[in-house]
């Protein structure tokens, strides 16, 4: 009977409730719908479907499944049961294994099987299982972190297979009791039998060099390792008087060379180094996290302060991008120099600037102009939104983003580093990891039994450990992304001093309205007044209303960081305001209206004196001019609507300037029926030529 047909019969024997449980856990099995159990079994046996459900298994469930895969054989109908697996999984109980096997069977990763013909009569009443046919492929080349058996290595590594016969004979000459071998197959069987026997393993390791057992323990998660430079195959012989641990293991066939640089630990050797078991660290319960207590007031102050600072900096970034769009590299992303320039404008460091660029782009506040390859501020409602709505826009965009801003600055395999807003920071799995991290923090916070008024704060390593226990197949993703995710969450107020805030708990639960309301209640109302001082500075004692902050920034230069900012007035800042169309009366009226103190006399003198000297010399742009003694003719030319595109401006009664070049102006006027005289002016600067 084929494996798929056997699985189809297993599925057909299930009740409706059991089938509902299966399809709820693996919805991909009925998308699109299947006509019968044969088709359902075929879909449940595909590698991609099995890999999806493997990512949802906890650490003990995955360990049991790997043990089942290593101890069963579909071709010889060698099935297994809980009592048999107990000896292969240290620290397990038959009751716990029965429960896990039943769950794996409910997920259609295992199917019921008949007991092996050699099974004891005492086990005949137990439930036996076989894995789905594609499980070994889905688990990968090295399930449970164990290598290939000797029989496979002898065939797939022919050079090692030829050496294996000599290794067995050499071990026999040293007094090791083992079967004689004259072919690679029999030699592989003999060495496997020796290593799998606890007594034989102890005799073999009796004369091992120091640190050999420590070296074997390093192969816990992967059986493949690199050979140290000081180790050499030429010295991996039994009669070497002072071998290194690697040379000693290779000489006895306990490490198999794959090439000049890598070795593999055979499966029976890996099991022997673990105490002759497949799983040596079986834990039914997740690791108990060690937390440090953080007062709720400290947590909230840190979180709300971070939110206020992030909103302020995003607003400043948009103003800077509106003034000077952010340029990109030809290869994509924002270069280090441009990030440094924006950092100087915002008065923060480069990593913080990169994070703000990513956050603003994710939220749609910055958009890439494809014609100029520059990031520009998007015209929108950002400045009109309340602060809790601004935060909501940023936080939702971050949570759903398929990018990892924390990767900016990390090295690339081919050299260089990830640029801000570059394609290399794209991570389609980032939303899943963020959801899992926040969900785990919320779960641990709900289980926290600490003293009232405090919250437990987890460090990054403890959180990654907890996440890995629940989904061990995602361990590399967690280790790569979670540290940066925690830093980003703290900037958005989801964490405060390392502890989950009420905002973070609400976001983890999907309650965005509740989170926004909590933030609205917590943040102080924006101020519309500031303090003017005699040293030509203004102090904002808190968050200013956006309109007041923009107007104040237009006539002064911000100094320092934080919501309690200092603004300094100077002749240059006042001239900047005058260039934008403001006048002295308007500036003084604004200062008088929004200052909590009287306008200092030095500041009043500065504004009035700068305005009095402003405009005595005027600068304009013109590419050509038109001169005529006929003033009425020039007036008619200016009034002619057909000359609007020439940008004509009267400079004096007899002179008109134009934004068009002299050649373009002459051609256009002739097309309109005028007869201008134009004479090319020779270059004023000498042209240098190189003599041969």
Image: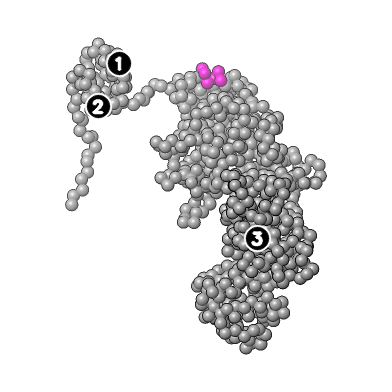
Query: Any magenta on residue 589?
Result: yes
User: SS for tag 1?
Assistant: helix
User: SS for tag 2?
Assistant: helix
Q: Which residue lies most toward the right here?
A: 451
Most common secondary structure along the magenta stretch: helix
Q: Quadrant of the N terminus?
A: bottom right
Q: Position of residue 267 (x, y in %)?
A: 63, 70
Q: Foreground mark, 1 or 2? A: 1
Q: Position of residue 553 (x, y in %)?
A: 54, 29
Which quadrant of the structure image shows residue 176?
bottom right
Q: Residue at x 79, y 40 (%)?
A: 453
Q: CA distance from mark 1 to mark 2?
A: 17 Å
Task: Residue under label 3, please give it.
Answer: 131
Task: Residue under label 2, please give it.
Answer: 664
Given residues 610 and 691, the one toward you in this image is 691
Look at the image and give the residue range highlighted in magenta: 585-590
Res 627 seen here: yes
For label 2, the crowd category at 10 Å Cα-Cα, with few meaning under 14, some 14 to 19 and many 20 or more, is few
Q: Residue at x 48, y 46 (%)?
A: 423
User: SS for tag 3?
Assistant: strand
User: Where 441 sits versus 122, above or below?
Assistant: above
Q: Earlier in the sequence, mark 1 or mark 2?
A: 1
Q: Foreground mark, 2 or 3? A: 3
Q: Residue at x 67, y 46 (%)?
A: 24
For label 3, the crowd category at 10 Å Cα-Cα, with few meaning under 14, some 14 to 19 and many 20 or more, is many
Given residues 254 and 161, the one toward you in this image is 161
Q: Foreground mark, 3 or 1? A: 3
Q: CA distance from mark 3 to mark 1?
A: 85 Å
Q: Position of residue 42 (x, y in %)?
A: 59, 54
Task: Residue under label 1, please give it.
Answer: 641
Which quadrant of the structure image shows residue 313?
top right
User: Where 282 sits versus 664, above or below?
Assistant: below
């Amino acid at each position: 009977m084929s494996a798929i047909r056997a699985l189809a019969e297993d599925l057909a024997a299930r009740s409706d409730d059991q089938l509902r449980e299966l399809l709820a856990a693996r919805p991909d099995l009925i998308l699109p719908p299947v006509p019968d159990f044969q088709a359902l079994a075929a879909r449940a046996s595909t590698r991609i479907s099995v890999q999806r459900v493997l990512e949802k298994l906890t650490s003990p469930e995955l360990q049991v499944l790997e043990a089942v895969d290593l101890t069963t054989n579909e071709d010889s109908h060698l099935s297994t049961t809980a009592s048999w697996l107990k000896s292969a999984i240290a620290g397990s109980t038959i009751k716990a294994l029965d429960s896990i096997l039943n769950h794996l069977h409910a997920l259609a990763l295992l199917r019921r099987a008949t007991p092996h013909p050699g099974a004891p009569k005492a086990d005949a009443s137990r439930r036996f299982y076989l894995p789905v046919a594609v499980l070994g492929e889905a688990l990968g080349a090295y399930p449970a972190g164990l290598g290939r058996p000797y029989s496979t290595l002898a065939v797939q590594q022919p050079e090692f297979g030829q050496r294996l016969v000599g290794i067995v004979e050499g071990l026999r000459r040293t007094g090791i009791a083992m079967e004689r071998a004259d072919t690679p197959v029999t030699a592989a069987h003999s060495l496997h039998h020796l290593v799998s026997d606890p007594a034989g393993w102890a005799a073999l390791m009796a004369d091992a060099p120091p640190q050999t057992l420590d070296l074997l323990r390093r192969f816990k998660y992967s059986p493949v390792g690199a050979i140290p430079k000081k180790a050499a195959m030429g010295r991996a012989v039994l009669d070497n008087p002072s071998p290194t641990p690697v040379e000693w293991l290779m000489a006895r066939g306990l490490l198999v060379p794959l090439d000049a640089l890598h070795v593999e630990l055979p499966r029976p050797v890996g099991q022997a180094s673990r105490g002759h078991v497949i799983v040596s660290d079986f834990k039914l319960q997740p690791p108990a996290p060690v937390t440090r207590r953080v007062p709720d007031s400290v947590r909230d102050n840190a979180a709300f302060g971070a939110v206020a600072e992030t909103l302020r900096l995003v607003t400043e970034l948009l103003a800077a991008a509106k003034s000077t769009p952010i340029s990109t590299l030809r290869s994509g992303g924002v270069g280090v120099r441009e990030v440094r320039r924006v950092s100087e404008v915002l008065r923060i460091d480069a990593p913080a600037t990169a994070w703000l660029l990513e956050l603003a782009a994710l939220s749609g506040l910055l958009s890439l102009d494809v014609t100029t390859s520059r990031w520009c501020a998007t015209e929108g409602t950002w400045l009109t939104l309340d602060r809790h709505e601004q935060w909501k826009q940023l936080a939702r965009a971050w949570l759903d983003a398929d990018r990892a801003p924390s990767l900016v600055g990390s090295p690339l395999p081919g050299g260089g580093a990830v640029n801000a807003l570059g394609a290399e920071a794209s991570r389609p799995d980032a939303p899943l990891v963020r959801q899992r991290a926040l969900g785990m923090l919320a779960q641990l916070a709900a289980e926290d039994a600490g003293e009232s008024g405090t919250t437990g704060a987890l460090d990054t390593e403890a959180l990654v450990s907890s996440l890995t226990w629940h989904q061990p197949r995602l361990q590399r993703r967690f280790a790569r992304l979670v540290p940066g995710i925690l830093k980003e969450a703290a900037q958005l107020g989801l964490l405060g001093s390392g502890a989950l805030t009420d905002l973070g708990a609400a976001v983890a639960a999907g309650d965005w309205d509740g989170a926004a309301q909590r933030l609205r209640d917590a943040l102080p109302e924006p101020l519309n007044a500031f303090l003017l001082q005699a040293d030509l500075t203004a102090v904002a004692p808190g968050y200013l209303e956006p309109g007041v902050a923009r107007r104040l920034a237009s006539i002064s230069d911000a100094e320092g960081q934080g919501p309690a900012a200092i603004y300094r007035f100077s002749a240059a800042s006042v001239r900047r305001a005058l260039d934008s169309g403001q006048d002295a009366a308007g500036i003084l009226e604004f200062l008088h209206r929004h200052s909590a103190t009287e306008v200092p006399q030095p500041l009043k003198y500065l504004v009035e004196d700068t305005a009095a000297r402003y405009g005595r010399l005027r600068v304009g742009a013109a590419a050509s001019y038109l001169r005529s003694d006929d003033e009425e003719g020039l007036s008619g030319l200016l009034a002619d609507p057909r000359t609007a595109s020439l940008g004509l401006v009267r400079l004096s009664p007899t002179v008109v300037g134009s934004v068009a070049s002299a050649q373009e102006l002459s051609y256009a006027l002739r097309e309109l029926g005028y007869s201008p005289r134009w004479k090319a002016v020779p270059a004023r600067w000498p042209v240098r030529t190189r003599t041969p």
